[in-house]
Amino acid sequence: KMFEDSVLDNLETQIVSSSRRHVSAEPLDTHTMTLNASPSAQTRVLIRGGRVVNDDMMLDADVYIEDGIIKQVGSNLHTPGGAKVIEAKGHLVIPGGIDTHTHMQLPFMGTFAVDDFYTGTRAALAGGTTMIMDFALPSRGESLVEAFHKWRAWADPKVCCDYSLHVGVTWWGPKVEAEIQELSRDLGVNSFKMFMAYKDTWQLDDTELLNAFTACKGAGALAQVHAENGDAIKENSRKLLAQGITGPEGHELSRPEEVEAEATNRACVLANQVGCPLYVVHVMSKSAADVVREKRKAGHIVFGEPIAACLGTTGQHYTHTCWRHAAAFVMGPPLRPDPTTPSYLMELLANGDLQCTGTDHCTFNASQKALGKDDFTKIPNGVNGVEDRMSIIWENGVTQGKMDPCRFVAVTSTNAAKIFNIYPKKGRIAVGSDADIVVWNPHATRVISAKTHHQAVDFNIFEGMEVHGIAHYVLSRGRVVVEEGEVRAVSGSGEFVANPPYSPAVYARTPARDAARAWKKVERAPYTGPVIDLSSSSTSNGATTAAGEERCVARRSAGQQQQQQEITYSRGSSTIENSPKRPSVKVNQPPGGNTVGSFW
Ligand code: URP
Ligand code: ZN
Ligand code: ZN
């Protein structure tokens, strides 16, 4: 908050002082021109006459950029010569979009996602996204740090915009815990994704999830979950295939909403048990979103990320009679057939129940999807979104009157920058911030199509949709990479952005919350009565009812202590034992009889 205040103070000072200066640029009769062209022209840019929109304010102001950084915001700026001028009258000047969830060139289900770090980030820029957050996903047993370096080597020479990496925790062991520490402390990763689906490959069980959440908490990192019950999916898939349902509709039938909602609830409960903040990626259904909303209301530190796909289209496409069309929509969790889903999720996003937006951009061409032509479980999971996310949210959010431009900025960039701890470097138009800027035309329209999009994939799940909101100009660290809609991206010009641990937006209230929720021991005199001898093999009740009651009370007390010790161990230790610690005592005739559902 203090940081935020200082940014605002800075901004206000800048506006006041710059309004006393006079305009240095001549009136323009074209959209752009370079004043006193010089070799430095490309590093100096003046965006003139637009409406600056941040998550908390809008103001009509010019923005002056030098060497990739915003240097002045205000009216009548005094700027040095040699600046490229972008005329932004009638446009909004917004922070570049941050897509929190992509998978460029992901090796997955026997093939590779077709959009790589070049085509994917180029398409991102075309749509007004200036930063992506991708995932380094090690295979089972592979080092997380090695996977991180592998992804960096893939991305660095290709990215046209800035990027950061989340890392997947696809297996568990002491080495993984150490690597979560190392990645958070030294390598700029502050978020780790755990999978509750993809049984037999990436799925973690509950004990492993608890261990991973504990390790994230210890490292000041944010735990992320892919929330679907992988066991239920596997069993449903087996039954569907046995019934001859092999087409893409089987994908959705095998993992209905409650499979997502159950896992979302379980993830929230498990994370909360160890006090770890949680981020639910790709929240795809109304019921899963409701879980996030309810848990937030109950005080959990949990964030929810719907994606462009579920905000812009539905799972009704799974019953399309063209196999290729239906297969194009296969992703996990699936899009939902309920046609009210996009509008419902947009409302939650608009009103603060959900926070960030990604795309899960992970694209496969027809011939790749066809790996599952006879078995829906073999269709590579993934859809497009990186190019169209901003327009989809503008169209279904702002144009539909669900959110204002400030909230649009919050859910497309600022909240992500805050949660992943790169604010206000990213996600804000302010002095000192990176010049990742979009000059957004809110009135222009376009029709989305695979024929015209910049993505490498041969299909677009939003095909034919007319959207308002176009990225007229895009600047990536001050470089003009989209000019009047023309993309001029340069491979390798983007940079890796380190996400530091202990994000204030995530961890600021955890110490006080942990203290307030700490377990309290009850001080009492020790029990001094008789204790049943469990080694005795007597089969008779042998005691009066009163004595039986007494033993029952004694046993209950012991049981509670045992349970207490187990839980204390779980919270206090960095690794939780898999084996249940229960007394292995056979009681033939439990006191009180064999009533089902009793304490025994
Ligand atoms: O279908 C999806 N979501 N593909 C990408 C991998 C993942 O689970 O995010
Ligand atoms: Zn996922
Ligand atoms: Zn994903």
Image: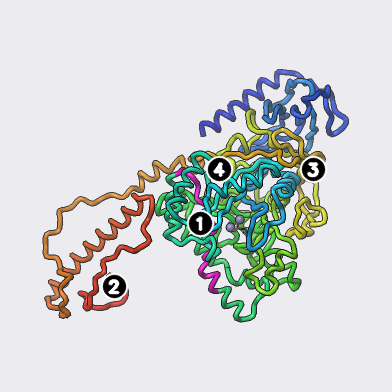
Asked whether the beta carbons under mark 4 and mark 1 sit within 8 Å of each other, the answer is no
Q: Position of residue 260 (x, y in %)?
A: 54, 63
Is label 4 in a helix, a strand or a loop? loop
Q: Nearer the viewer, mark 4 or mark 1?
A: 1
Q: Residue at x 73, y 71 (%)?
A: 323
Q: Residue at x 22, y 62 (%)?
A: 558
Q: Which residue is nearer to you in this view: 24 or 561? A: 561
Residue identifier under label 4: 420
Amino acid at dot 1: Gly
Residue identifier under label 2: 598
Sooner in the amino-acid sequence: mark 1 or mark 2: 1
Q: Is residue 10 visible?
A: yes
Amino acid at dot 2: Ser
Q: Position of residue 148 (x, y in %)?
A: 57, 47
In this rendering, position of residue 22 left or right of residue 310? right
Magenta part of the protein: which range? Answer: 219-235
Sooner in the amino-acid sequence: mark 3 or mark 2: 3
Label 4, label 3: how far apart the Cα atoms are: 28 Å
Mark 4 sits near ligand 3, with its Cβ under 8 Å away: no
In this rendering, position of residue 81 left or right of residue 141? right
Residue identifier under label 1: 141
Amino acid at dot 3: Val
Q: Quadrant of residue 21?
A: top right
As for residue 220 lying within the magenta part, the answer is yes
